[in-house]
Image (cartoon, helix red, strand yellow):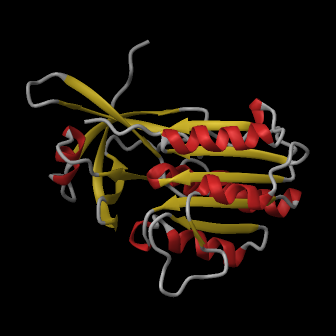
Amino acid sequence: MAIVHFPLRVVGSRMLAPSVRHLEFARDDGQPLDFIPGQFIQVHFNYADGTPTKRSYSLATMHDHALGPGEAVEIAVSYVAGGAATALFEALDEGQQIQASGPYGRFCLMPNDTNRRYLLIGTGTGVTPYRAMLPRLAELIRERGIEVVLLFGCRTPQELLYGDDFRAFAAANPGFRFVPCFSRALPADASPDDRRGYVQDALAEFAPSADGDIAYLCGNPNMVDACFEVLKSAGLPVPHIRREKYVSAK
């Protein structure tokens, strides 16, 4: 089946970190993008020699899907030195268009889950799908009384992507705990939930349990593999460890 492309027009952007840009688009064909939180879109473009290529970006849009499809299409883009996609996005200004397709992917909260707790683990832009999941997680906290722990690994406080969103959500939803893990430097005003080190090292503190936990792993492949082993050792069945690896491409 042919992939259907649609035009996205930049309606806003901001830098989340020194090398990560948040972009907000509107579909220029007048159609909404109905997606399940955790899914991604693909952006289609050409290399300098005209060869077509594409890159995948998780949707960051926080939207209440009970109200129907949303209008905004939001992604976070990591800039990679010398990257073809980086050149595309660095040159992209408000009002300009790109071509995209999707949504794709199954890295989503499952409707039949009966777990007591979600362990959401991410590094870098791998935290993006968890931002999109926040409205649904709020419903699950209310409806099923679940707990959610988000462990987010980055190097420095300047790279804490969407930190304000996650902290505000934690303040409004007592069942949600946000635990940033800084591998190089803690914030000067570190909170009690801030950790020094890697997410895979902090994971044991939360006593992963085969009885009540489902875990999501998204981001650096080494982190995903390390956390997968920790969770398997704790007895979590493989179907309860859902993974998505982010590999930078030029």
Q: Looking at the picture, how far across and down is residue 99, in whole percent? A: 28, 36
Where residue 65 appears, as percent x and y from the top left, is 63, 51
Q: Which one is nearer the viewer's eye here, 160 or 197? A: 197
Residue 63 seen by the camera: no
Vertical placement of 194 versus 132: above or below? below
Which residue is situated farthest in the right direction here? 211
Q: Is residue 6 above or below residue 171?
A: above
**Residue at position x 81%, y 43% from top?**
234
Residue projecting furthest to the left? 49
Residue 112 shows up from this direction: yes
Q: In what quadrant of the picture does the N terminus appear?
A: top left
Q: Nearer the viewer, residue 168 or 156?
A: 156
Residue 246 falls left or right of residue 118: left
Q: Residue at x 11, y 24 (%)?
A: 50
**Residue 77 in the image: above or below residue 11:** above
The total of numbered circles placed on residues is 0
Residue at image location 15% in from the left, 52% down from the top: 91
Residue 39 at x, y percent in the picture: 54, 40
Instruction: Kindly identify the residue that appears in the image at 19 percent across and 51 percent down.
Output: 96
Measured from the top left, where is residue 146 in percent x and y?
83, 58
Q: Is residue 138 left or right of residue 151?
A: right
Image quarter of residue 47: top left
Residue 244 sits in quarter: top right
Q: Quadrant of the C terminus?
A: top left
In the rendered image, the residue lying farthest to the top is 1
Q: Nearer the viewer, residue 185 or 216?
A: 185
53 to the left or right of 211: left
